[in-house]
Each structure stands twice: as C-alpha cells, then as structure tokens.
Amino acid sequence: MPELPEVETVRRGLEPVMTGATVTQLEVRRPGLRYPFPGEFAARLEGAKITGLGRRAKYLLADLSTGETLLMHLGMSGSFRIEAEAGSKMPGIFHHDRSKLAVHDHVVFHLGTSGGAARVVYNDPRRFGFMQLIEAGKRDECAFLSGLGVEPTGNALSTEVIARLFEGRKSPVKAALLDQRLIAGLGNIYVCEALHAAGISPMRGAGTLVNRNGAPSKRLAPLAECIREVISRAIEAGGSSLRDHRQADGSLGYFQHSFSVYDREGEACPKPGCNGIVARVVQSGRSTFYCPVCQR
DNA sequence: AAGGGAGCCTGGCGGC
DNA sequence: TGCCGCCAGGCTCCCT
C-alpha cells in the first residue's frame, strides 16, 4: 500500500530492467483495474521501447519511444515483480523460471532487454490501481498530474512554502498534508509520522500554524524538514529491502518498516523524555495515530 | 468553496 | 474451527 517512498522504491527496482527494454508483448488479463484500460492498450505498447522510468508523487511514468507516456498508479494493493525468462543473463534479477500467473496478476509486460527476455508482472488484489496512456506532448493536460502540488522531497518544500499553503486554511493539518493538491505524495502513514516528528497535533487547524503576517509560526518551523526526513529515511529503508526482496522472489513494493506512531495505539511514545501514550482517532474517515503529550 | 462521507474491491484479522 | 464484521497505506465523486 504504497505512498511516495514505496513508489520510489518500486521505480528504482523496475528501472534497471525496464529502461532501454522493448515491450515485446503486453498481456492484459482483464478489461481494467480501477478504470478501464486505454483503448488499443496492448497495441500502443507492443513494439515500443521504454526510454525512461520516472515518478511524480505516487505515479510511475514510463516514457515510450512512441512519444506516449504510460502512467501507472498502485492504488492500495498494487505491486510489481520481475522475472527473468529462462536462459537470460540478468545479474541481480530473480532468475527462477516461473510460468504460472496468480489470480490477481492483471498485466504482464514481456520485455526484451540487452540481458535477455524478462517479464514484469503487475499484481493488484483490490484493483484500486490503474494504468493510462498519455498521448505525446499532452502530459501537461493529464488530469491526474496537472493538479498535483509540490513534491515533498528536495528543496521545493520549505517552511515558507508550507506556510503559504496553510494560510487561512481551517481544515486540520492532517487533512491539509493528505491533500495532494498542496503537497503530492504523502499518505496516511507518513503524515502521521511527520507530524509526530515535528511535534504538531494532527487536529490543529492548518491555518493556526501561520502567523498573521503570513510567516511560519515557531511550531510550524520543523515540519518541512521532518517531512523530508521521514520520506528519505523510508526510501533508504526501501532500498535495502529491495535488495532482499529481489533475492527472495523478485517482488517489489511493500517492505517491513517500523513506525514511531503509526499502528502503535496504546504504546509508549518513542520520543526521548516523553511519557505519552500513542492514541488513535478517526479524522475524515481514516485513522490518525499521534501522541497527545508531545504533539500540540 | 472547502470539507466530510461514500464508494470502489479483496484479503486478513480479531472476536464470538 | 468457522463465520462475520471490521479494517486497510488512495483517489474521485457527490453532497452540504
């Protein structure tokens, strides 16, 4: 159930196999996932070379030699696995020849690479994921991408930027951080984690973190750095699990990661010197985990 | 207009 | 053990 770090981990796992590969066959095993697959889906991909694999927020973007872009979203339960076909030489890639597909293997990319033939299998039990093709030169018009806010990685996200986004906003800061139009890529887990790291209560109105002159309040100050930290540490953890996973069975996607507050209701707050107990509340229908003592 | 809730799906888990 | 209800990390649409 991927948020930005998991999607980035998947991207890094797929990139060495997919970039430069040619789609020799696209096996589409049902009419669609969350949305129907695009018209002529297989025909538009077959024969195309994948020239690059990027990411924007929680979207994977594969650039094709046809000029089109394949946009992929993993929804809540999507994952990929890589399987080298028998006889191909692909160091580091799961090598066992497995021809069977599982019930929820919905899309199979058969690829020709410099190291031989491989296949990349998309599995998604809940089918909240989706794939779309963006026509050449129309990426800016793509509704999935055009409304997205700032990436939470890198320097684009600063305390000042957050203050501008939060100013005058009455919704809880938890909801504001989940709003992909403001900051794109955070999900429920990492919002909980970042707010805990920053010592900010998830119930606090976003606008209350901004001074009357529009400047960030003292309490808001650590948030941008905490978001970047939480995300980058999760990506690092994903990187190491990626190596393990690949050796195990070629699957990419989820990885074990321990959290400070997420799913830890009733446990002691891990912040040094804090004697609080992690609490769970429901905000706009989803669980929020936080420490009532050190998050204000 | 912003904010909250329902709905899309299946699988896994805890409780009885 | 078996069944049932609840819950899940995303996103969009619809309603207020």
Image (tube, coloured by chain):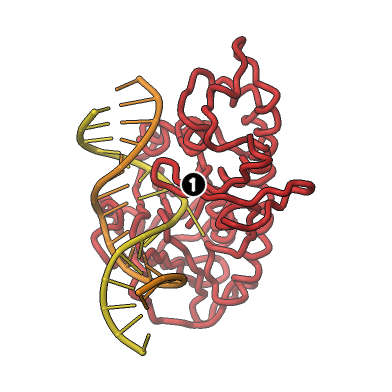
Chain colours: A red, B orange, C yellow
Kindly give the residue lying farthest to the right in the view shown: A273
**Secondary structure category for the residue under label 1:** strand
Q: Is residue A92 left or right of residue A70?
A: right
The picture places residue A293, in percent across and down from the top left corner, at: 66, 42
Residue designated by label 1: A281
Q: Nearer the viewer, residue A273 or A228?
A: A273
Classify A194 as above or below A43: above
Q: Quadrant of residue A226?
A: top right
The quarter of the image holding the C terminus of chain A is top right
Q: Amino acid at mark 1?
A: Val
The picture places residue A156, in percent across and down from the top left corner, at: 62, 30
The picture places residue A64, in percent across and down from the top left corner, at: 44, 49
Q: Residue at 62%, 31% (x, y): give it.
A: A157
> How many residues crowd around disc 1 within 10 Å: few (fewer than 14), some, or many (20 or more)?
some
Q: Residue at 59%, 26% (x, y): give it.
A: A162
Q: Nearer the viewer, residue A96 or B16?
A: B16
The chain carrying label 1 is: A
Q: Is residue A38 left or right of residue A114?
A: left
Q: Residue at 68%, 63% (x, y): give it.
A: A240
